[in-house]
Amino acid sequence: MPKIFRNKTVSPGGNINGVLELPGDKSISHRYAILAALAEGRTEILNYSSAADCKSSLGCLRRLGIKADLTRERLRITGKGLDGLQAPRRTLDAENSGTTIRMLAGVLAGQPFASTLSGDASLRARPMRRVVEPLRKMGAEISTHEGDCAPLEIRGSKLHSIDYSLPIPSAQVKSAILLAGLYSDGVTTVCEPVRTRDHTELALREFGATIESLNKSVRIHPRPKLQARRLIVPGDLSSAVFFIAAALVLPDSSLMLHNVGLNPTRTRILDFLISIGATIHLASVELRGGELIGDVSVRHSALAGGEIGGAQSAEMIDELPMLAVLGPYTEKGIEIRGAQELRMKESDRIATLAEGLRRMGAVVEEFQDGLRVQGRSAGKLRGAKVDPAGDHRIAMALAIAALGAEGDTVIRNADCVAVSYPEFFTTLERLRGEEKGDQDLRK
Ligand code: S3P
C-alpha cells in the first residue's frame, strides 16, 4: 500500500478520447515472476505490471534469494530451479496482495525450510483457510492466526498429490495447489465449480511443465524442469474496463485500447457489456506466450442495464465494482447476485460500493450476495465525499461514477489505486484532455 494518503477530486463532464496502451496484466505478471524464479536461467519479462501488488511478489521472491532486476523497460529474473529458493531470514510481506500470499503459500509448502507469509491489515483479515486446507491435505504443515488468517507459518514438508475439488471458485487457490503440485510425489488434480482465470495453467505450460486441462479440471505432473523464457505481459483488461466504462458513460467518447489481454476466462465482462448495448469491437487478436492479446475499441453507447448472477459473477469478479457504478447510467439499472466473494476482497466490496453510491444519490439495495443499483429514472448522481476504504478497485469505480455526476466528487485516500493501477488518475486526465498530472491530489 502507498504510504501517503491523499484525497482526489474528480470533476464531471468532458469526454474520453484517444489511444491507450495499458500496463501489464496483474494476474499474469505475478505468475510469470514466480515461475521465472522456479525456472533455470534468466527470464526476461516485458510490460511487467506497475501494480504495487506485483512489486510485493518481487519483494517476497528477493527475500527467497532470487535476483529480480526491474527497470521501466523490463524485468529480469535469474531463476534457480525448483530447488533453488533460500530460507528467508524475515517474514515475507505480501502487503495488500492476495495473489502473492496465496500463490506463494503453494510454492513454500513444498520447500525444505520454514517461512512466514504475512501482509497489511486488509490482507490479514482475508480468509486463508481456502488455501491452507488443500495444502495441508498435500502434507504441508501450516499454522495460521486466529480465524484462519495470515500470518501463515509454513514448515516445508514432502508433499503428496491430491485430487481436490474447490468448494468455491478461486484462481488463487487453484494456482496454489498447482504450484504445490510441482513438488508433490504424483499427478495433482484440481476441479473447479466454475472455470476461473487460467493464467497459471498457460504460464506453467510456457515454462515447460506438463499440465492438462479438460473442462473444469486441471492435472499437473510433478518435478518438471522449468526453463527461462522471454515473455511479454498483455495489457490488463481489469484495469482497461474502467476506461471502457468512462467512454460508455461520457457522450462523444471514442477510445482505442492496444495490446489488451483477451484470455477468454477474463472477457465475460466484454460479452456482458455488448449484450446490454455497448459498442465494443475487437481487432488484431493474436496468441502470444499462450495468451490472447488484441485491440479493443469502444464508443459512448446507450446501455440497457441488466442482471448478472451465479457463474457469471465469479467469471467477472474483479469487474463487478465497475458494473455496479454503471447502474445509474443505464435504463434498467444493474443487479449483481451470487457475488458473496466480493465481501472477502480488499474491502467488503458490496458494502463499500453501496455506501459510496448512496452518498452520490444512487438508489441501492444491498443483498448478502450482491446489490441492485437503480437506473437513470432514479435520478442523476451528485458529487459527494466518498471513501473507498483503501480498496483500489472501489476508488477507480467511484471515479468513473463521478464523471457523469452533478458537481465534484472527492475520493478519500485515492492513492490506493496504486495497488493495481498507479497511473489511473493521470491516464484519466490525459484521455479527458486535462493533462494535469497529480497536482490536484490534495492533502
Ligand atoms: C486473481 C484471482 C481472483 C481475483 C484477484 C486476482 C488471480 O481472486 O479476484 O484479483 O490473480 O488469481 P480469487 O481467486 O480469490 O477469486
Image: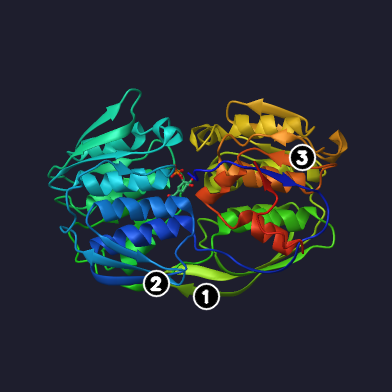
Mark 3 and mark 2 residues within 8 Å of each other at the beta carbon: no
Residue 35 left/right relative to 169: left
View extreme (top): residue: 146
Residue at 82% x, 54% y: name it: 302
Q: Residues within 10 Å of mark 3 (few under 14, many from 20)?
A: many
Q: Position of residue 427 (x, y in %)?
A: 66, 60
- Image-quadrant location for residue 94: top left
- Seen in the picture, residue 107 relative to 253 is either above or below; the reply is above
Give the Cα distance between marks 2 and 1. Answer: 15 Å
Q: Earlier in the sequence, mark 3 or mark 2?
A: 2
Q: Amino acid at mark 3?
A: Gly
Q: Amino acid at mark 1?
A: Glu
Helix, strand or loop at label 2? It is: strand
Mark 3 and mark 1 residues within 8 Å of each other at the beta carbon: no
Residue at 74% x, 47% y: name it: 10
**Location of the C terminus (image quadrant):** top right
The residue lying toward the viewer, choosing from 148 and 181, is 148
Q: Earlier in the sequence, mark 2 or mark 1?
A: 2
Helix, strand or loop at label 1? It is: strand
Q: Residues within 10 Å of mark 2 (few under 14, many from 20)?
A: some
Is the distance from the Cβ of mark 2 to the nearest ligand 1 atom less than 8 Å?
Answer: no
Helix, strand or loop at label 3? It is: loop
Q: Position of residue 12 (x, y in %)?
A: 81, 49
Give the label on residue 231, or none: 2
Residue 170 left/right relative to 394: left
Residue 4 left/right relative to 178: right
Mark 2 and mark 1 residues within 8 Å of each other at the beta carbon: no
Give the label on residue 333, or none: 3
Which residue is disc 1 drawn over?
A: 286
